[in-house]
Image (cartoon, grey):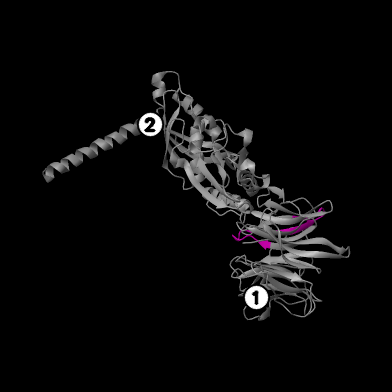
Amino acid sequence: MSKQLSKKIIHAITIVSLFGVAISSMAMLSLELTQGTRSRLPIAIVSLEGEQALSADRQTSRIVMDDLNHSGEFSVFSGAQLPEQPQALEDIHVSRWHGFSPQYIVFGKVHPVGVDQYTVEASLVNLYRGQEGDKLPPSAVIFKKSYTVNEQQLRRVAHQMSDDVYSSLLGVSGVFSSKIAYILVQPGKTPTQPNYHLVVADYDGYNPRFAANSNQPMMSPAWSPDGHQIAFVSFQKTLPAIFIVDIRTGILQQVTALAGINGAPAWSPDGKNLAFVSSQTGAAKLYVIDLASRQVSRLTDGLSIDTEPHYMPDGRSLVFTSNRGGGPQIYQYTFATKRVERLTYVGDYNASANISPDGKWMTLLHRDKNGFNVAVQNLMTDQFKLLTHDNEDESPKFSPNSQLILYATHTGHKHLLAIVSVDGQIHLLLPANDGNIQEPSWSK
Amino acid sequence: MVDQYKGLILEAIGQHWLVPTGVSPSLACQLMITVGEQGNVDTVQLIKSSGNVLLDQSAIAAVYKASPLPLPSDKDAAAVFKQLRLTLKPEQILES
């Protein structure tokens, strides 16, 4: 074929295809839709085949359902709310789902594979990814995963599945495998001498275990950024001092030995320094200790009480509570300039500030005529919003993904842990141990 | 007549459109839809992504959920709706 001819053919093809496009776009009707309904992600969770043989608190589908409900990002549908209960992709009849809300579905199976060994298999599927007849194409499967574990580990695997669903759909990590720490006060041999425990548990309160125990008060647990250590205040010695426990080894070390009261430890984001409070010169003031060299430097001075430091995620400044303006309010201390700036102006009592890991929000304890409640302040706009109305709340702490806030609350005479979402939409109480739960902290 | 059915089709799809929380109203995605003779949705193709996967997927799901789409009973009039180019913009979203 000559060059000339092939050029002509190409030319002709171009004209034909241009013509073709022109025809089809003329024939095609263009529509524009601007109206819909806002919704959390609608997802169906089907009971896993074979999980009925397990106790309720080890059933993957129940745990995943709870996790996704807790997250505030999903509308979960299950049981009779579903048109069918598929156990595999082939079981799904697409047309049956059209009148129903779910857009995604989780199903799978649990089967024993030996003595105390189970294989858990679960799939996340997009119900609207095209169809072949009344069936979904294989490309509708977003993931299919399986884990083999013993019975003790079934909750962990379910949380992992929840994290997989959360991150696959939302593109950010879930919190379902994270840990919390808190102080548990239980009755001791005599009513005047209770026992104190530093407890580490799953984020939902399950699997609690003791990381440190004492017959003297413990307070203010704070997770190290790597999640291996917890700093806390112990009254074991005559005056309160700061200790660090390694939760892998149980090894305990004392960090501060300044005169007076030492408390309120806060880790720097790189894990190298601890900010804390000491009253060695009289009023409570902020200090920082370099954990490697044990060198201590003082940050604030004056007659006011400065306490409850918490680092900003970039490590360049920290927020703290001070009564330097009269009542307690939140201030920000910047290391480079040593300058202090007031951050809160709503009401006459704001304390216990905690910054979200993404740096966008500050949660704090706000007191008004009703009592103590959890509030958030948007750090960009300074917009302030009350999230709880329990009137007896304390110690709000952000989740590692900045979506949820863990805090301590009271119902009747019981102290409990509760979670509220940063938009205030989700409220839940965590299962309670015997005894009083205080001062939670959420691992990174 | 065509305009009346355009409106009915948009209403049907809009009723099924569950817009994910936190999506910016300035985003838009575009779909190509082929419709069978009975109004059944045969294929939905994403021809322009909004850049937000969840918004794209919510749009595609809305179209499938609205199947069969309302079509004029007259065959020639219905043929106009054989292929649709649908732009979805979450500008007027009801808070559920």
Based on the displayed image, in which of its 4 quarters is residue B20 positioned?
Answer: top right
Query: What x and y, as percent, mark residue A358?
Result: 59, 60
**In this rendering, does residue B26 appear at all?**
no
Query: Residue A70 magenta-drawn?
Result: no
Task: Quickly name the residue at label 2.
Answer: A28
Query: What x and y, as percent, mark residue A60?
Result: 61, 46
Q: Which residues are magenta?
A: A354-373
Extreme-top residue of the structure:
B74
Residue A91 vs residue A383, the one in the foreground:
A91
Residue A349 vs residue A291, the one in the foreground:
A291
Residue B32 vs residue A336, the one in the foreground:
B32
Task: Quickly name the residue at label 1.
Answer: A338
In this rendering, the answer to whether A408 lies above or below A29 is below
Query: What x and y, as percent, mark residue A221?
Result: 71, 66
Based on the displayed image, in which of its 4 quarters is residue A5 positioned?
Answer: top left
Q: What residue is at 78 percent from the left and 51 percent from the top? A: A390
Query: What x and y, as percent, mark residue A270?
Result: 59, 70
**In this rendering, does residue A180 appear at all?**
yes
- The amino acid type of the residue labelled 1 equals Lys
Is label 2 in a helix, a strand or a loop?
loop
Query: Residue A357 magenta-drawn?
Result: yes
Q: Are marks 2 and 1 in contact (CB under 8 Å)?
A: no
Number of other residues with Cα within 10 Å of mark 1, as a class: few under 14, some 14 to 19, many 20 or more: few
Q: Are marks 2 and 1 on the same chain?
A: yes
Residue A294 vs residue B8, the one in the foreground:
A294
Is label 1 in a helix, a strand or a loop?
loop
Q: In the picture, which quadrant includes the C terminus of chain B?
A: top right
Rounded to the nearest angstrom, the CA distance separating label 2 from label 1 is: 65 Å
Number of other residues with Cα within 10 Å of mark 2, as a class: few under 14, some 14 to 19, many 20 or more: some
In this rendering, the answer to whether A252 lies above or below A381 is below
